[in-house]
Image (cartoon, coloured by chain):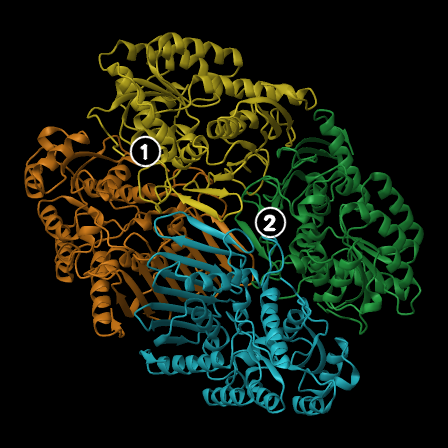
Chain colours: A orange, B cyan, C green, D yellow
Amino acid sequence: MTLNTDNARLRLGMVGGGQGAFIGAVHRMAARIDDQFELVAGALSADPARAQSSGAAIGLAPDRIYDGYEQMLEREAARADRIDAVAIVTPNHLHFPVARRALELGFHVICDKPMTLTTAEAEALVALQAQTGLVFVLTHNYTGYPMVRQARAMVEAGELGALRVVQVEYPQEWLTQAVESKQAEWRTDPSRSGAGGCIGDIGTHCFQLARYVTGLTPEAILADLSSFVPGRKLDDNVNMLLRFVGGARGMLWASQVAPGHDNGLKLRVYGEKAGLEWVQATPNDLIFTPYAAPKQIIARNGGGTLPAARRVTRVPAGHPEGYVEGFSTLYGEAARAIRAHKAGQALDPAVHYPTVADGLEGMRFIAAAVASSAAGGVWTAL
Amino acid sequence: MTLNTDNARLRLGMVGGGQGAFIGAVHRMAARIDDQFELVAGALSADPARAQSSGAAIGLAPDRIYDGYEQMLEREAARADRIDAVAIVTPNHLHFPVARRALELGFHVICDKPMTLTTAEAEALVALQAQTGLVFVLTHNYTGYPMVRQARAMVEAGELGALRVVQVEYPQEWLTQAVESKQAEWRTDPSRSGAGGCIGDIGTHCFQLARYVTGLTPEAILADLSSFVPGRKLDDNVNMLLRFVGGARGMLWASQVAPGHDNGLKLRVYGEKAGLEWVQATPNDLIFTPYAAPKQIIARNGGGTLPAARRVTRVPAGHPEGYVEGFSTLYGEAARAIRAHKAGQALDPAVHYPTVADGLEGMRFIAAAVASSAAGGVWTAL
Amino acid sequence: MTLNTDNARLRLGMVGGGQGAFIGAVHRMAARIDDQFELVAGALSADPARAQSSGAAIGLAPDRIYDGYEQMLEREAARADRIDAVAIVTPNHLHFPVARRALELGFHVICDKPMTLTTAEAEALVALQAQTGLVFVLTHNYTGYPMVRQARAMVEAGELGALRVVQVEYPQEWLTQAVESKQAEWRTDPSRSGAGGCIGDIGTHCFQLARYVTGLTPEAILADLSSFVPGRKLDDNVNMLLRFVGGARGMLWASQVAPGHDNGLKLRVYGEKAGLEWVQATPNDLIFTPYAAPKQIIARNGGGTLPAARRVTRVPAGHPEGYVEGFSTLYGEAARAIRAHKAGQALDPAVHYPTVADGLEGMRFIAAAVASSAAGGVWTAL
Amino acid sequence: MTLNTDNARLRLGMVGGGQGAFIGAVHRMAARIDDQFELVAGALSADPARAQSSGAAIGLAPDRIYDGYEQMLEREAARADRIDAVAIVTPNHLHFPVARRALELGFHVICDKPMTLTTAEAEALVALQAQTGLVFVLTHNYTGYPMVRQARAMVEAGELGALRVVQVEYPQEWLTQAVESKQAEWRTDPSRSGAGGCIGDIGTHCFQLARYVTGLTPEAILADLSSFVPGRKLDDNVNMLLRFVGGARGMLWASQVAPGHDNGLKLRVYGEKAGLEWVQATPNDLIFTPYAAPKQIIARNGGGTLPAARRVTRVPAGHPEGYVEGFSTLYGEAARAIRAHKAGQALDPAVHYPTVADGLEGMRFIAAAVASSAAGGVWTAL
């Protein structure tokens, strides 16, 4: 993999990600690994003092540490060396206003998921992105793991035959008890997280991952959301059935109250000829199970890997790549798309990433799940 | 474990299990391992010639090889050395008539699951067993694995706290394609298998195992049954949601069309304090996951095992016990119950096994699942 | 697999295996599973009272419960319904006198390993067995696991190419501390165990398993034996290098002081084209690793299994067979060999088992290891 | 973890690592992740044209792309904005001349292993480093994995008791056949790799990892080196026994001809009270096995982790960190050491990394192994 095809790094600004934040630091590491971006500006906190200290701590130039996202976007828009793109790593409720303003001012956007608070906001972003033609990358980061791309390529190549059954799950334990951390606080607050708790935070990852790998179109879902911890306002466990166009069937389990699981994302897909299994905690292996034959463990960068996987991997088989590298793949794809945009050139068709359309689909998924469950657990069209 | 506490083996007759049958041979091995039974009579096939050759092949005395179950039960009833118990290992549709006749003639019964073809038949057996007071063991064999008993004992002891989430699955690959084997043929035929295909054959195992370990009472289920292989009359994939009394929630997946899975039975249970995971293919380990602490792998007969598990294990930790040994545990429990019955003594309270009541519950479960799915996938009371 | 090809069970006597013994109970279960033997006589303990109570507990007829092996062998030799074979499950120092007397009186022998206390005794048994032509089965039981037979068949078929590297290990934790159990006591006593402790008890299993699967001929070994627990007279840890004829190289580790390991026997073999890995604790899988290709997990009785493995398996893939079943395979082979001997017929060439020659090889291996280590750890011819 | 405690990145130059090189790209990613270094200068290839194109490809300023290491070190030494440190990522034979010149000119050094071609060179570097007081980091990168640090901290804290047995292995498959790649070519050439092939390339990793985690002092080793592939000049398989001061015993296996293994580094350590197991391919778990108790799986950043591990981790438990992050830990430690050196301050005692002394020990280890094997496999003092 050619990690850097151009001498000049793209210039990145960040909204959110101040001291103590988790995902902002991940974005910064991810942006650095493949050396396509230089973080040069930031509005890292809504609290101006914290924005300043956070910016200084990561070495931003003083004149590019901003007190708020509006300030950052407007002043950057006026600079000759203005940023190319904005990374939005705030709680959910700020994704929309920041992304909208960024697009309006001509910045490419790299945005955390779920994309917005509401479906209406998501629709507005879809329209705005279409109108501006700017690059919009939604960081459904699990699609950046090489063996997830291998799985998708194998499905596309027909190695499983027509798909029948999809099983996806994402159990976590961290909200098993009432938790007071910064991470937990906004994620369990509807005004900042949206209508979904667990369904929005990790259920959307399940849904998008299953969609990405299988290519199946969901037709209807049925959700049974629970909130097990007393006083919790949002769901912390999601049990769901899915029906896909063409007859395939699925199940989805997302939970934040499952002791023993840190980030237990797992996808299994079964077709007429074979199955596939991928587990996020051991992401360098893909298990391929042809019918009535030995199981195969395909190693990242090892025998049997396809170009779609190899083009986004960095180190030899047996040396594990991890979460940050998977995330970094999306930054690499973003860089390629932004460079093509700047150059007015067609994008290499191998390059792809979750888009604003995936973001809208995710918001519709959350809304449907919440509605299905509120109605007692009934089939709800997607 | 004292494997044989009495000099005299109990005398066993078998209905079904002729040459080429799978489960009959398993029952015979299971009955032998702990040396509590001697198989002395058999009506091994509905085809008299095959009944004769099958009986001869396993060394039955010629006068105790019978041409049909009625003949066997009646003639045995007249013998001084009559059999103590009958093992019923036929296709499902014969369970009821054989079991009924056996109970009527005073024989204890060891019967394969699902117990009957219909709920009405199951109710009749419940009544008949109550009336006769005879021992009736339903071979939900997975409850015989020591680490399943360990799991149940840990739940009972409160080591998980109040339970919230139950995940159970049993994927298989063997019916991924249209299969013509003897095993497959009757299992996909409603007249011999009953209203359920996959739901009856392995879905009931999931349900019973979850019930056994958790002690939770199911309130309602919602099933989405599919039949993926063209021409198949019964379901070959079951997606299901469950609601338990008290608020716990569950999911159940059973499939016969999942390439890569031979007998992928797995149970996971999560409570307020900890979780448990058990996998049938590696049955000697139980994974215990206290919240925010390292995972523990508890080995059969190793440190941390409880009396409920140790009393049904045979060999040291690290030497695996398997499927037949798990099955054999039920034969051991049956023997203890039958010996107590014969002696007119109270049964050791540690002894337990799936009963005719479990069989009825299983039939109601199948009926509810089929009804739920037929109605489009709606919540159905249990 | 035809589990019983003859109506009449063979008659078995047992020496050793009284109450509290571990391996005697295993032999009895193993002898029953495939229904080829009926245990009818026993000298289960050197203590007459215990011999009586132990025999009664397992249901032996009073006149065939003997007070010592000489008594048993002599009286049985005089019976019309005399036993066919003797199972020897005593501490090591009794193997030789019992086996010798049994052969002298015309009984087939099934004997635990290591075969004798000394190499000289082993040579005497080899001669006696050759002279009598009786069946002598040494219970190196791991060769009875179907996937060990699969491994051997794959090596023989050339699927690995010429072999280069052999890695075998058998760590246990049970003697990490000074232990006072019956099992531990004689195994750490040179007068009953022989010159080797760990090397004799489990090192010989490693060696024999490696020999069995690879077919390689060892040329020289170099051993570094340790005795870590203060006061222990025999080795409790074995580090060893091996050189094979033709240039292949090996390592062997056996330990009784490795916390975390119950019976961690593992064999790995690497050739010019592929490797194999088998682990006793999960014996139903064989991992096959062709060079530069995905790993394959071959399941017992599943796709890719060879006749050599399938002929000794009992239940479908995914339903685990365990330690007792593996042991039982040797009883099955013993039965086939004894029946052929009785019938004066040639033995099916597929039938095989560890012989008296393997026993002698094992004794030479122990002697060489002890000598190598005593000399400071030097290369010693085998 | 505070990833960047200072605004200004340290300036890094690189020798080696041109297009097509593997380890240079890893060093660059590792240097970027924690954002402590900016690569500003490079002599990336001995071939001037390739040095130029490689430097341009990664965005170096034209005036800091050098044609050779002497040129780079001398010109950089003259700059006001001179580099702080040199990363040496060449084949082994160049480590010494580059490191020597760098130290002479006052540059800190980050150097690949094995440190030199000969023991004499290593001794010279030890002296030069002592004389200059500069920071010298040897990239035995596996010591950067958080759970390796956890293992070391647990041993130090006495959680295993006195150590008895060490098992370390590093099998690879990549040289199973004669391979013509750039990576393979110099590693099998004594003039560029040194006296050891496999023993130098990966055997030293085993040795250093075992030393690092256990703290044991090796007393003597015995090596049996093989070269299986016809025509290969250096060893491709290492079988080794070790004796440690105080009586602990070890085994070491390193192989480049083991099909199925990509980078199968594994360390197991056993003491009087417990054992530990760590596997590089799944580096986020550490298996802790107290005697006679359930196994524990300690997750990186999860319950039971110690400060020594937590201070070098980046993302939550369950999101895997990989090879590059482990490598990056050493760059982070290097940065802390260099900053302390620049500031004339004492180094935080928690900071540590493999030093020039480890490098010398590694060279002595290689020499002893080669000598031991050449003498036929005899015990050789270390």
Rendered view: D83 above or below B77: above
The tally of labels here is 2
Chain letter for the residue marked with disc 2 in the picture: C
D136 sits to left or right of A294: left
Chain letter for the residue marked with disc 1 in the picture: D
Q: Name the residue beneath numbered marker 1.
A: D311
Q: Nearer the viewer, residue C95 or D371?
A: C95
Mark 2 and mark 1 residues within 8 Å of each other at the beta carbon: no
Where residue A2 sits in the image (x, y, percent)? 35, 36
Q: Name the residue beneath numbered marker 2.
A: C279
Q: Amino acid at mark 1?
A: Arg
Rendered view: A11 above or below B253: above
Quarter of the image containing the C terminus of chain D?
top right
Check disc 2 and report its element: helix, strand or loop. Answer: strand
Where residue B323 sits in the image (x, y, percent)? 59, 65
Q: Amino acid at mark 2?
A: Val
Where residue B295 sits in the image (x, y, percent)? 42, 50
User: Is residue B89 visible to the viewer in this orientation of the structure?
Assistant: yes
Q: Nearer the viewer, residue A149 or B32?
A: B32
The residue at 26%/36% (across/down) is: A36
Of labels 2 and 1, the one closer to you: 1
Q: Which mark is residue D18?
A: none
Check disc 1 and report its element: helix, strand or loop. Answer: loop
